[in-house]
Amino acid sequence: MKEKDSQFSNSLIAWYLENARILPWRSTRDPYLVWLSEIILQQTRVDQGMPYYNRFSQAFPTVHHLADASEETVFKLWQGLGYYSRARNLHFTAKYVSNELDGVFPTSYSELIKLKGVGDYTASAIASICSDEAQAVVDGNVYRVLSRVFGLDTPIDTTLGKRQFRELAQQLIDPKQPGTYNQAIMEFGARYCVPRNPTCEGCIFQSKCVGYKLGKVGELPVKKGKTKVRPVYHNYLVVTSEDGKTLLEKREGRGIWQGLYQFPMTESDQPIGSALPDTVLELYQSKYGLRSVIRYKEEPVIHLLSHRKIYAHFWILQTEELKKEGVDYSRIEEFAVPVLLDNFIREFPVFASGK
DNA sequence: AAAACGGGGAT
DNA sequence: ATCCCAGTTTT
């Protein structure tokens, strides 16, 4: 297998031409739209990303439309998709291409890799699809297919593993149709060579697949690390007022949900107990005139992230008036918020009836 | 090299 | 409960 294995790519492409889904970003070679789809699909399933792609491509048909939008608008459209740094980098890069590159979106790997939010995978995908550049993509699907078919068991979350898989993929790519090859291997991984219980009976690679031959399909690809989930306790101060307003603040600094809005809150690795600290109560009393404080529910809302287990309590602080500092109940939905808060906002009667 | 970064679907 | 997803950036 040192020279070339065009049989692998030929089989893959033949399978793809018969089994490819019709997806909106597959009917264009506009690098802007392909880039948009690739950013949305990073660590995101096609079914989950599809509605977002449709919304974004309709709201921003060109890179100029996206560049001219406010960051608030971009974040609001991105709400619910997660990994919000993607939205910030998306907007940054749109402005860069619009202003510095005269709106001409790059299509070469070497230019694409310089863009914020574009790494090896995304640069390879766009370059291969939009300008037939033979750069092999390596995503989760590619790791799975190659590790099984070729029996490559180097852990994929190591520097060595990444290099070996990238080299193997690069040696397998069809230089005549790199975009089709790249999409074919990803589609095959997503639809056929799935993570758990793949139907190896009838697979086009069954006779060749080393993983199948060794009965190790279920153990491939090999991963080394395991992300540990840390508990964290959130206490949100949901201020209501007699003039129908609440308080929202923007999450600054680095960390989860950077750039999104939230109710004022405390965050700790320990629960705070059954009452808010006196200092907090005194602050709101002196600033807004505190009428009453109640905890919304006894049991915390548990919100799971890939690396956090959030225990959230909501405290309702009734005040006299918030005036200009406050946000009208009816306008809360204009702000991009984490799903945890969106769920609360939609079920909290005071806000729900405000619409 | 390892950790941070979301949310949802599948088993 | 566990794993994983058309990964990238920061530490």
Image (cartoon, coloured by chain):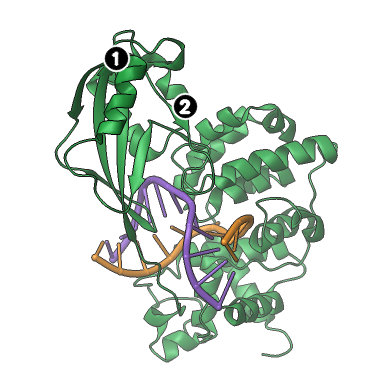
Chain colours: A green, B purple, C orange
User: In the picture, residue A236 is in which quadrant?
Assistant: top left
Q: Is residue A339 above or below residue C11?
A: above
Residue A95 on image: x %, y %: 74, 36
Q: Is residue A81 left or right of residue A281?
A: right
Crowd class of label 2 (few under 14; some 14 to 19; many from 20; radius 10 Å) = many
Q: Is residue A241 above or below residue A101?
A: above
> Judging from the image, what secondary structure is the residue with disc 2 in?
loop
Residue A194 on image: x %, y %: 42, 68
Name the residue at 71% across, 43% down.
Answer: A93
Q: Earlier in the sequence, mark 2 or mark 1?
A: 1
Residue A167 on image: x %, y %: 68, 79
Q: CA distance from mark 2 to mark 1?
A: 26 Å
Q: Are marks 2 and 1 in contact (CB under 8 Å)?
A: no
Tell me which chain the residue with mark 2 is part of: A
In the rendered structure, find residue A221 and report the number of the disc placed on it. none
In the rendered structure, find residue A289 and report the number of the disc placed on it. 1
Residue A99 on image: x %, y %: 81, 35
Residue closer to the observer: A244 or A2: A244
Q: Which residue is mark 2?
A: A335
Q: Is residue A94 left or right of residue A22?
A: right
Is the N terminus of chain A in the top left, top right, bottom left or bottom right quadrant? bottom right
User: In the picture, residue A285 is in which quadrant?
Assistant: top left
